[in-house]
Amino acid sequence: MRLEYFQMIDRVLAVGPESIEAEALVPAASPVFEGHFPGYPLVPGVLLVETMAQAAGYLLLYRQDFARMPFLAAVKEAKFRNFVPPETRLEVSARLAHDGSGYAVLRTGVARGGQRLCDAELTLRTLPFPTPELEAAMRAQAERIGLAAAPRP
Amino acid sequence: MASAFDRIADIIAETSDVPRETILPDSHVIEDLGIDSLDFLDIVFAIDKDFGIKVPVETWTQEVNSGQAPAEQYFVMKNLATRIEELVAAKAANG
């Protein structure tokens, strides 16, 4: 994870049409930890939501073969069950709950060693890529985390 | 079984802050009920689940924005209910 660059997903472990599993390694140090919190570094809950949203987004990119860009539209039932300190290996998952017209609803979660840390129901809108630069950047990020090469769940 | 109008009105009342009794057949979902696009997404999700269909809201929006269809065709409650009934019938016909 590069928290300050919003690069939350490090590697896709498995992906299929309905679900994705990914890995995220919390760094030992980040400017984020200087403020959250001084002397007691924790990954902020909002960044855990972003981590789940990115896993959900990569699943939709995979499903739609990069035809459209997913944008986070709603967060429901978000629960943060435990603290996430530096140097934690996170297992991030997203499962498609409903594939709508121009939107999708996904059940997402973050775990550590199989233990649930947080979960949420996310709604993502999908829109045509607003710029070619964004599409190229998303394709490069997907390549970096091995989206296309990941095995099926 | 309640009518499509009643089921949709119930969904809107449960999903948004709109009182059920103010939702009438001639109510415009956006102009009269004050539903914004994000709330409408929630409503569409609930309709999709409740009726077992996929409301083509993107196509509708494109038709309205391009002037191919008046907004009332999709976003006035009685017409919305008719559109949903058509989608349910089409799904049943296609198996």
Image: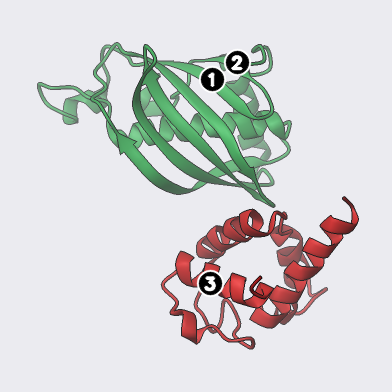
Chain colours: A green, B red
Percent coordinates x, y for residue A34 in the rendering = 18, 25
Residue drawn at x 68%, y 59% is B51
Residue B82: quarter of image = bottom right
Query: Disc number at residue A14?
Result: 2
Label 2's element?
Answer: strand
The x, y position of residue A40, in whole percent, is 13, 22
In the foreground, A145 or A14: A14
Question: Hey, what amino acid is under mark 1?
Answer: Glu
Most extreme residue toward the front is B1
Q: CA distance from mark 2 to mark 3?
A: 40 Å
Q: Which mark is residue A21?
A: 1
Q: Chain of mark 2?
A: A
Marks 3, 1: nearer the viewer: 3
Mark 2 Cα shell of 10 Å, populated few (<14), some (14-19), many (≥20): some
Q: Is residue A34 left or right of residue B43?
A: left
Q: Quadrant of the C terminus of chain A?
A: top right
Do tag 2 and tag 1 residues touch (Cβ < 8 Å)?
yes
- Which image quadrant is residue A51 in? top left
Seen in the image, is B20 located left or right of residue B44? left
User: Where does label 3 land, which residue?
Assistant: B10
Give the CA distance from mark 3 to mark 1: 37 Å
Front residue of A138/B56: it is: B56
- Marked residue nearer the N-terminal end (2 or 1): 2
